[in-house]
Image (cartoon, rainbow, N blue to C red):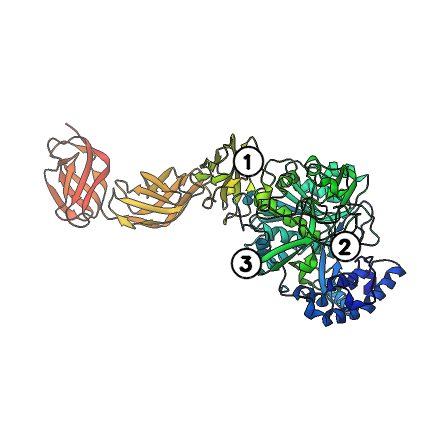
Amino acid sequence: MYLSKNYALMRKRTLLVTVLAIPAHGLYDSLRMDEGFKRGGPASHRRAGIAIALATVVALALATSSAAIGAGARSHTRFRIHRVCRTPRPGRAACLGMKLVPTSLTSSALHANAIRQSSEAAGGARPAVTNKSPTPGFLTPQRLHAAYALPSETAASSLQTVAVVDAFDDPTAEADLDVYDKQFGLPACTTANGCFHKVNQAGNASPLPHKQGEWAGEISIDVQMARAVCQSCRILLVEASSEEFSDLGTAVNAAVNAGATEISNSYGGPEQPSYASLATTYFDHPGVVVAASSGDCGYLNKACSGEETHANFPADSPRVLAVGGTSLSESKAAWSSTAWSEGGSGCSAVFTAAAWQSAVANFSATGCGAGRSVADVSAIGDPETGVDVYDSTPEGNGNPTGWGVWGGTSVSSPIVAAEFGLAGGARGVAYPAATLYPHLGDAGALYDVASGNNGTCAGATSCKAVTGYDGPTGVGSPLGLQAFSVPGTPVNGAPPAISGFTEQGQTLTATHGEWSNSPTSLSEQWARCNAAGYGCAAISGASGSTYTVAAADAGSTIRVQETAVNANGAGAPAASTQTATVASNVPTISGFTPASGITGSVLTIEGTALVGVSEVRIGALAASFSVVSPTQLKAIVPNGAKAGKVAVHAPGGSASTKAKFTPTLSVTAFSPKQGAPGKAVTVKGVGFTSGASVSFDGVPAGSVSFVSSRKLKATVPAGAGTGTITVTNASPPVGTVSSAGSFVVSP
């Protein structure tokens, strides 16, 4: 029976008899049908029956009062909220994703969907997608950027890798991301172009853990939200073998080892004293942004039955950036946020507050004493004002697949982690949460969420949004990227630049950018990017002012990122524009011009990897040449040239043309090779004309006889010295050409 397979949690709410007297939002919260079921015994089924019986009453009540509610609330009649993951057991985490499911889907319809999807999967086919278009009116990447005043790209973001850590495998994660990117006009982010990478908790591409439909939906949220915010960041998906904290923590360590600069953890469970060692072993990574969702069951998880009333781990660790949830709304292009009623918060009974948190002016109002307060910062989490996500892997319970509206602090965490990526990462700060707190109260950097609550806590601000710091929303929601900067650090005015040929074996040189605030040191990091300049990965050991292009760079572009530091810390890194695509050092020739000409004329050779060319030959003869660019050479047709192929030789290899260059005027041979003045010499070649003149070492011949266009006879003149024989045509082909060797004048 479907109802026993639904893992959502039953809210501890009270139904009021006078239905229409209750505000629509509150009534809807109290009767979320899909949250009324929990795997287990008879009590769960009794709660389910109550929820089903009341669903029609709710829909009628909301529909009757729709004229007085407003557009956002009217959508409540169309959806119920589904909590994706079950209540976690000790030592394990629950994913914190939530989605809207149409109220029109009855339990029998969902059961039928589940059977169909299971049958299709068993038959080896990918289950058919239910929703092929996003639901209008919710949050797209473009609307998220508008709401949080974010740039689409920064000079600092191309070298950032945002990792998302989740349990189990989502086999369609990359394919779903491709659908998301195409829907919203984002550049492709694939394994092939280096933007997307998926590994197991050991950091290897295989074997991957087994598929689990609920966590697959969580993975879709995390990957697509990171992508929505930072479109030039790389995305690393690390899949843990299970939802045990030890496995998830191992996956976090794997993300760090793989070079992640930001890590989002959209899961959690009620803290336990024993988790202090987990925090040290797995979630303490100085210099890396480690973000974690605060939870979706309100203050101390009191909004969900069956949950222990504690702050959630790992968000409660003071070395982790705890991300709370808000409700986000827009009116006439003006955005506003309130504390989401189900976003997690609370005082930790295990961990002490970090110094940067306990030092804020109104921290004592939280009632946490010296304890850690969750959260540090916040972003959209309310599914009723949620985000568009595409997930084609069925959960197993018949819920629709494809496009859906999702929420939970599962959305909040990857958004903030990716904002850090867009801003250039930790910038040398050991625990980047510390960067946010000095901006508290700066309206240009943070939206101070000052209304809403997520429970009751005896008047403390651990459960109520107020001006300044509070538990549900922390320091507020970042606007733009200023909140991620350390005041007084260097600011880039002009990015660094790269000079040199982008060819294997060649040396590139970085020219420093321009910085304000008197940096005391500058450092470079070279990176390998795809052809479009995205998907950049730092090149290990390449941190000097020069870089020698390696074989691994062929087909890629190169960027250099520069970081400036002063006494206040590191500024946001600045990156150069990408170079041209790196060519292999194996040369190629695409063509040459002209196809014919006299010896001594200039021949232009086009191709690739021409910078390293050490020899050019036309036929059997070597030609002098100069390198114009990696794709062009200028060669001089050598004396004595005959018709022949054009070839180039370089340390990486050789290349030659199929077509032949044809000399139009050339001295190819003469005989005898020596003689005294008065000696008759036969000059052979091509292009000779009647009336052509001949010289020996610059002295005109005593007499010249035209035999044919390929042969002349000339007499060695008196006064001639040893040297080349030259032929000059006065009629086409006009010009003067010389022999390759010297005629020796003997006594």
Q: Are marks 3 and 2 in contact (CB under 8 Å)?
A: no
Residue type at mark 1 is: Gly
Which numbered disc covers residue 185?
A: 3
Q: Position of residue 605 (x, y in %)?
A: 34, 46
Q: Quadrant of residue 214?
A: bottom right
Q: Residues within 10 Å of mark 3 (few under 14, many from 20)?
A: few
Pointer 3 or 1: first along the chain: 3
Q: Position of residue 396 (x, y in %)?
A: 76, 61
Figure label count:
3
Residue at image location 51% in from the left, 44% down from the top: 155
Q: Quadrant of residue 340?
A: bottom right
Pointer 1 or 2: first along the chain: 2
On-image quarter of the N terminus: bottom right
Q: CA distance from mark 3 to mark 2?
A: 31 Å
Against 225, is 107 above or below? below
**Label 3 SS:** loop
The answer to whether residue 199 shows anywhere in this view is no
Q: Quadrant of residue 26?
A: bottom right
On-image quarter of the C terminus: top left
Q: Which residue is mark 2?
A: 85
Which numbered disc covers residue 95?
A: none
Q: Position of residue 245 (x, y in %)?
A: 77, 44
**Label 1 SS:** loop
Residue type at mark 3 is: Gly
Residue type at mark 2 is: Cys
Pointer 3 or 2: first along the chain: 2
Q: Are marks 1 and 2 in contact (CB under 8 Å)?
A: no
Q: Is residue 430 left or right of residue 34?
A: left
Q: Which residue is mark 1?
A: 488
Using the image as rendered, state which of residue 26 and residue 89 is in the foreground.
26
Q: Residues within 10 Å of mark 1 (few under 14, many from 20)?
A: some
